Amino acid sequence: MEIPSHYLERAVGEFAQLPGIGRKTAMRLVLHLLRWEQKDVEAFAESLHELATNVHYCSECHNICDDELCPICASPKRDHATICVVESVQDVMAIEATQQYHGVYHVLGGIISPMDGIGPQDLEIESLVERVNRGGINEVILALSPTMEGDTTSFYIFRRLATFSDVEITTLARGVAQNDQLHYTDEVTLGRSIVDRKPFRN
Amino acid sequence: MEIPSHYLERAVGEFAQLPGIGRKTAMRLVLHLLRWEQKDVEAFAESLHELATNVHYCSECHNICDDELCPICASPKRDHATICVVESVQDVMAIEATQQYHGVYHVLGGIISPMDGIGPQDLEIESLVERVNRGGINEVILALSPTMEGDTTSFYIFRRLATFSDVEITTLARGVAQNDQLHYTDEVTLGRSIVDRKPFRN
C-alpha cells in the first residue's frame, strides 16, 4: 500500500512499532489524528516529549514516578516494613486499586524467562536483596503471576532471601476466582483451593 | 486506577482518545514506549508534530499529500478524464493497490449519514460538481461502499451530476467475492451476481 505523504508514512511507521498495532490499524489511528485540531495533535506530541524527558523510576522501589521517590515510598502512612514484590508498574496499580494493601512495593521490571533471554541480572533483584539487607523489613510478599516464569522467579528470590531468617516470605493465596464457574476452573487451581480450604465465615 | 506519574497519566490520556484504544490498552502502549530509547520516543513525538504541521490535502482531489497537488493528480500518466469518487484516503490506497485503475480520484471525506449528522454540505461534493463543470471529464465512477449510506450518497451525487449529459456515471460491479464460499454469500449479493452474469472466459 503506497502512502501519498511522507509525513503520514512516517507517523504510520511509528504507530506500527507499538505492540498489537499493525500497519492498517496504525493508518486508521493516524487518519483519525488528522481529523483533530492541529493544537490537539501538538499536545499529543508534547505529551510524548514530556514522557521521554520527565518520567523517572523511584530510587527505592523502581515504580514509575515524577520525583526521586514515588508517592508510595514517600508516604509516612504506608507500612515500610512490608515489601510486595511485583513484575511491573501495572501490577502496582492493580494491587493499589484493591485498597487492601498498605505496605510498599518493589518492581522487578520483568520476570525470569530464559526463552526471552531474561535472567536474574536483568531484573531489580539485587536491589531488593540490598534493600532487605539494610534491615527493618518484616515481610516480603512475592506477588508474581502464577505462571511457570513467575514461579521460577519467586523461587529464585526466595532462595536469595533465605539468609535473612527474621524476614517472613509470603506469596499470594491461590484459589477459585470471584464469579468463576467451578466446573470451568482448571484442576490445579481447584485442587489447591480444596487443600487450602478455610473456615466458613459469612 | 491511580497512575503514579502526571506525565504517564497525560500520555495515557492522549492515547486513550484514539478510536478502539481504551485506558488499559493506552497504559500498555505507554509503558511499552517507556522501554524505548529516549531518542526514539522523541522521534515519535516529532513525527506527530510534523504530521500536524506539514500534511496537506490535494487542492484538486482532496487526497492527502505533501504539496499543492497529490502525486496522482500531478502525474501526466494518469487519465484525467476519469474521476473515481471515494469516501476516504484509505479507499484511494486500496484501489491503487489493485493496479487496475489509471484515472484520478475525488475524495469526499466521508459519506452522507443523517444518523451522524453528516449531510452533503459536509462533504467534498460541491467541489466535485465544479470539477466536472470545468469540462474535460468523460466518466465519473461512484466507488462508495455498498451500504445504505454509500448508496444514498451515490444517488445524491448521481442526481447532482445528471445535468452533465456527456459525462458517463458508473459504479463498481457487485458480485461474489474472490474465495468466498457461495453458500455463505448473502442473498442480495448472490441474486445480483446471477442477474449480472457475464460470458465465461478462461
Image (cartoon, coloured by chain):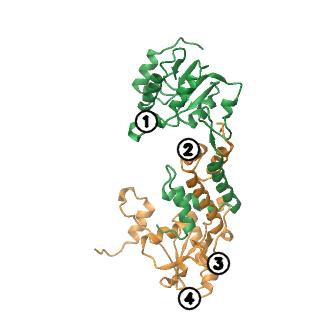
Chain colours: A green, B orange
Q: Badge 1 is on which residue?
A: A119
Tell me the SS state at disc 2: helix
Q: Is B26 placed above or below B1 here?
A: below
At 66% from the left and 64% from the top, the residue drawn is B118
In the image, is residue A32 above or below residue A186?
below
Across and down, in percent, residue B168 comes to 52, 83
Number of marks present in the image shown: 4
| The quarter of the displayed image where residue B191 is located | bottom left
- Label 3 marks a residue whose chain is B
Image depth: mark 3 or mark 1 in front: 1
Q: Residue tagged by mark 4?
A: B136
Q: What residue sits right under mark 3 in the picture?
A: B127
Residue B28, disc: 2
Q: Residue at x 41, y 27 (%)?
A: A186
Element carrying mark 4: loop
Mark 3: which amino acid? Ser
Q: Are marks 1 and 2 in contact (CB under 8 Å)?
A: no
The front one of A75 and A129 is A129
Question: What's the amino acid at mark 1?
Answer: Gly
Mark 4 and mark 2 lie on one chain; the one further toward the N terminus is: 2
Residue B97 position within the rendered picture, expressed as x and y whole percent measured from the top left: 44, 69
Mark 2 and mark 3 lie on one chain; the one further toward the N terminus is 2
What separation in Å lies between label 3 and label 1 (alpha carbons)? Answer: 62 Å
